[in-house]
Image: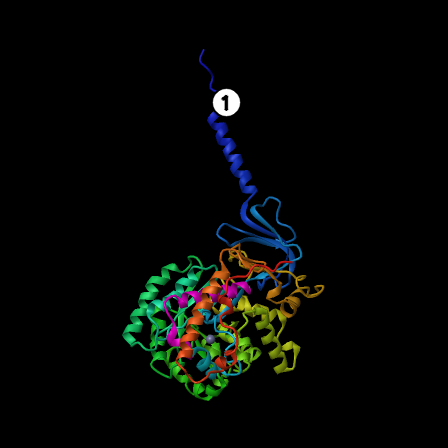
């Protein structure tokens, strides 16, 4: 008798089991991380109110789901983060920065911009050596990260250095977790053909790297009017068009040159530097015509209250600009002029100065100023599709704030407490792409004391070289003459015995 074939051959059973397995796996979706029990401040315009909730992060570091209450029971995660009692906000965005300048803080404290440039930068400029820009950029980027700034626009410096030194700034930043838009800068010493070739070669190299690692985009750190009315605006205007680039330019910062710079507005316009491709950094002293033109052209601006206060540059009328429809982001500028990279200080400086000027608490809300340092800055940098708010599909770049350490009192209005009561001291952890990069005062992946020691030794070498030149005694030399040198060069001391 011929064996009857079983109704469900063994192969079919295996198939069935496989299908059931796949279906149940789909029902219990797997994510890389679930953050739960958080007081969420998303800064997504569609959910302006804070709420108690959760979000999940997929394997590519993006937010896969977000909601109030508890995550669905079917959601499985490789890691879970219980954020009970913590406020979670998006990583801060600095839309105008000079990371290499981080080691030069606290210099020329009583100088306006031009005097500060002369005292804080000029004496050092001829003493940079190979490796300095990489070390200083790394140090500056980590300083930003430790204060909760997870994205920045790096307006770099390219002034009389070998091209390789300049590129160190790009490579150093690419090796770190902090996301960035890199602004290529022309070299004012070089002729048009050489600058054009350098820019073209850089873009051919850098553009394929956009979207890989921490590089969000490439842009142009425009010289604009910094070196006089020509030829840079004309070159830059042409090359923005030719290469399809966006640019950022300092404009109307120091009050002592505002009359002269306003008079040169037509030069910028005619060069093609006033349009949707331009962000003006500082932009403190525009007249009515400049404001109208800026709004009509769709140009943007970046406000830097700490730096503007420190250098006595003035207070931009942000409510007035926004009324005209000019998009406004915020930056910490270089650490050499904001000194402390604390975005909470930056927000308070801007918010309170604006309220003082207008003598109205309604001139700017706490939500407005937090939005300006997060989502509005991302919009101004044209990277809001990826960062700036806790939104499904964007990178999971977020900060954990502990309102109890140091204690900021019971929470009545979460956003007001974040803006008015918090500082970097409340920053418990910084996450980029769902990965913790900084926790409880330490970097997860970097030996910061070693990085700092290297930076301090390099700066000490430069100071020694400056002092040998016997330049007229600068303000910083006068104050520093009797202080011990290079405290940060010393090896880490062990904790004192109890
Ligand atoms: Zn600047």
Q: Is residue 150 visible?
A: no
Residue at disc 1, secondary structure: loop
Is residue 193 depicted above or below 359 in this figure? above
Towards the viewer: 493 or 406: 493
Residue 212, given in percent of the width and then of the height, sits at 42, 57
Magenta-tinted stretch: 122-147
User: Is 285 inside the magenta-drawn segment?
Assistant: no
Who's the residue at 51% across and 35% down the image?
19
Q: Quadrant of residue 272?
A: bottom left
Examine the rendering and report whether any part of residue 13 can be seen. yes
The answer to whether residue 127 is magenta is: yes
| Crowd rating for badge 1 (residues with CA inside 10 Å; few <14, some 14–19, many 20+) | few
Q: Residue at x 59, y 66 (%)?
A: 424
Splitting the image into 4 quarters, where does residue 183 fall?
bottom left
Relative image position of residue 35 (x, y in whole percent): 59, 52
> Is 96 in front, or is 29?
96
- Tell me the quarter of the image containing the N terminus: top left
Position of 239 relative to 91 (above/below): below
| Whether the residue under disc 1 has CB within 8 Å of ligand 1 | no
- The residue indicated by pointer 1 is 7
Dividing the image into 4 quarters, which one contains the C terminus? bottom right
Horizontal and vertical percent position of residue 84? 66, 54
Q: Is residue 224 above or below residue 134?
A: below
Frontmost residue, 37 versus 130: 130
Overall secondary structure of the magenta stretch?
Answer: helix
Q: Name the colouring of the figure.
A: rainbow
């Amino acid at each position: 008798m011929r064996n009857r074939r079983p109704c469900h051959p063994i192969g079919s059973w295996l198939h069935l089991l496989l299908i059931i397995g796949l279906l149940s796996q789909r029902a219990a979706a797997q994510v890389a991380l679930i953050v739960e029990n958080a007081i969420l401040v998303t800064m997504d315009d569609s959910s302006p109110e804070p709420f108690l909730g959760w979000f999940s992060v997929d394997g590519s570091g993006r937010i896969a789901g977000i909601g109030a209450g508890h995550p669905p029971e079917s959601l499985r995660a490789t890691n879970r983060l219980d954020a009970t009692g913590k406020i979670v906000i998006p990583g801060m965005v600095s839309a105008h920065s000079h990371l290499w300048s981080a080691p030069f803080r606290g210099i020329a404290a009583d100088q306006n911009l031009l005097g500060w440039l002369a005292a804080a930068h000029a004496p050092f400029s001829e003493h940079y050596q190979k490796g300095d820009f990489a070390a200083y950029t790394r140090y500056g980027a980590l300083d930003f990260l430790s204060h909760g700034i997870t994205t920045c626009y790096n307006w770099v410096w390219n002034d009389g250095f070998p091209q390789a030194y300049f590129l160190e700034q790009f490579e150093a930043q690419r090796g770190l977790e902090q996301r960035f838009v890199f602004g290529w800068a022309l070299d004012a010493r070089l002729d048009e053909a050489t600058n054009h070739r350098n820019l073209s070669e850089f873009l051919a190299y850098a553009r394929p790297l956009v979207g890989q690692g921490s590089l969000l985009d490439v842009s142009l750190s425009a010289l604009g009017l910094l070196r006089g009315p020509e030829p840079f605006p004309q070159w830059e205007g042409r090359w923005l068009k030719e290469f399809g680039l966006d640019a950022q330019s300092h404009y109307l910062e120091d009050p002592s040159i505002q009359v002269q710079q306003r008079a040169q507005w037509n030069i910028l316009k005619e060069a093609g530097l006033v349009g949707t491709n331009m962000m003006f950094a500082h932009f403190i002293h525009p007249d009515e015509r400049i404001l109208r033109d800026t709004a009509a052209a769709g140009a943007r601006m970046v406000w830097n209250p700490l730096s503007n206060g420190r250098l006595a540059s003035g207070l931009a009328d942000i409510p007035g600009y926004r009324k005209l429809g000019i998009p406004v982001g915020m930056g910490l500028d270089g650490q050499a002029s904001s000194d402390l990279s604390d975005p909470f200080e930056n927000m308070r400086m801007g918010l309170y100065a604006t309220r003082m000027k207008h003598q109205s608490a309604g001139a700017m809300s706490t939500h407005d100023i937090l939005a300006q340092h997060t989502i509005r800055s991302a919009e101004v940098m044209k990277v809001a599709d990826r960062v700036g708010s806790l939104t499904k599909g964007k990178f999971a770049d977020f900060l954990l704030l502990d309102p109890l350490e140091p204690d900021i009192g019971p929470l009545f209005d979460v956003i007001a407490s974040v803006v008015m009561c918090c500082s970097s001291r409340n920053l418990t952890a910084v996450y980029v792409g769902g990965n913790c990069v900084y926790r409880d005062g330490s970097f997860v992946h970097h030996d910061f004391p070693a990085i700092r020691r290297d930076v301090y030794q390099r700066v000490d070498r430069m100071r020694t070289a400056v002092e040998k030149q016997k330049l007229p005694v600068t303000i910083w030399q006068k104050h520093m003459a009797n202080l011990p040198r290079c405290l940060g060069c010393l090896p880490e001391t062990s904790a004192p015995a109890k």
